[in-house]
Amino acid sequence: MDFLSRTRYVPMNRRRRIYEGKGKILYEGPEPGTLIQHFKDDATAFNNKKHEIVDGKGVLNNRISEFIFNHLNEIGIPTHFLRRMNMREQLIREVEMIPLEVVVRNVAAGSLSKRLGLDEGTPLPRSIIEFYYKNDALDDPMVSEEHITAFGWCAPQEMDDIMALAIRVNDFLSGLFLGAGIRLVDFKIECGRLWEGDMMRIVVADEISPDSCRLWDIQSNEKMDKDRFRRDLGGMLEAYQEVARRLGIINDTDRPIGGGPVLVK
Ligand code: TMP
Ligand code: ASP
C-alpha cells in the first residue's frame, strides 16, 4: 500500500522538505504560498516517550482531517486547507504558525481532570479554552493570555480572533460528531497567519483528527481517539476507522485501511 501511494507521487524524495514533526511532514508545494502536508503512520504520546507505527493511521487522519476542514471552509471558518492530493497528502496554504496549542474542553478529561481533580466525564459548566506553548523541550507548558501577549507570540487582537475561531470550531464539531453518535469531549487546534498581500488573517491550520480530539461513543462512553494508544487500550486503528465510517467518509464495503489491527513496533 505504501509502495503504491509513493510511486504514484514520484517526486516525494526530490521535493524540498520544509519541516518534519512527530506525525507529519511538510513539503514545498507546487505553487508559491502552498505546501504539501504528509500524514505519517507514527503514533506518539507524552512528547514522543511513547512511539509506535500504526499502519494506516496516516491515511485515516488525512481523510478525516480533509472532511472536517472542507466543512469548516464551507461554513466560512477560514483554514489553510485547499484539497486532498492522495492517500496521505493534502495541499495546504503556507501560513506563519502561531506556537500555541489551543484546547477547547466541553467535558472534564485528561490533564484537566488531573490538574483540578475532576472525574473524567464531568460536564463542564461551559466550554473552556486553554493555551499551551508549543515547545518540546518544555513539554508544551500551559500558558495564559498574559504570557502569550507579553512574550509577543500573539497580539491581543489575534488572541480574540483565535478564541472566536476556537468557539466556532467547537460548535460545528460538537454538532457534527453528535450526529454520528459521538461526544466531543475536547480537542486541540493550531492556528496560523495567512498573508494575502498586505492583509493578514488568522486561519485554522495543522490537522483535526482523532489524534487531536477526545471522542467518546455517546451510548457506551467508549473512547474512539488517541487515548486508546496513550492508555494502552488497544484498537486504535479500528476506532479511527469507526469514526470515519460514522462520518460517512468510508463505508462498510471499503477494504480495511492498513494491515488491520496489528501494531508494528
Ligand atoms: P490534555 O487533556 O492532555 O491536555 O489534552 C486535551 C486535548 O488536546 C485532547 O483532545 C488531546 C489534545 N492534545 C493534542 O492534540 N496534542 C497534545 O500534545 C496534547 C497534550 C493534547
Ligand atoms: N502529541 C503529543 C506527543 O506526540 C502528545 C499527545 O498527543 O499525547 O507527544
Image (spheres, grey):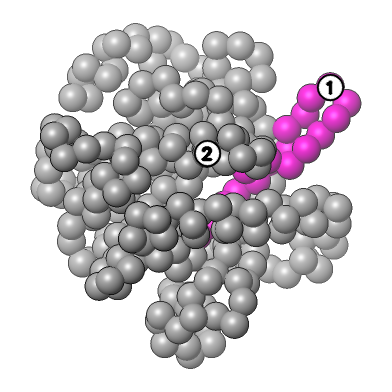
**Magenta residues, as a range?**
187-204
Give the x, y percent position of residue 16.
51, 17
Question: At x 42% / y 20%, what residue is drawn?
Answer: 85
Give the structural element (helix, strand or loop) at label 2. helix
Q: Is residue 11 left or right of residue 187?
A: left
Is 89 located above or below residue 172 in the figure? Answer: above
**Mark 2 = which residue?**
71
Of residues 166 and 134, which is closer to you in this image? 166
Of all residues shown, which one is farthest toward the bottom? 117
Give the structural element (helix, strand or loop) at label 1. loop
Question: At x 55% / y 25%, what residue is drawn?
Answer: 82
> For residue 23, which numbered disc appears in the image?
none
Whether residue 214 appears in this view of the structure is: no
* Tag 1: amino acid: Gly
Of all residues shown, which one is farthest toward the front? 179
Q: Is residue 237 left or right of residue 227?
A: left
**Mark 1 = which residue?**
197
Q: Is residue 137 left or right of residue 223?
A: right
Of residues 60 and 35, which is closer to you in this image? 60
How far apart in space, not on screen, are marks 1 and 2 (Cα)?
26 Å
Give the x, y percent position of residue 197.
84, 22
Give the x, y percent position of residue 190.
60, 49
Of residues 208 and 169, which is closer to you in this image? 169
Question: At x 30% / y 60%, what residue is drawn?
Answer: 224
Of residues 176 and 56, which is closer to you in this image? 176
Question: Is most of the magenta stretch helix, strand or loop?
Answer: strand
Earlier residue among tags 1 and 2: 2
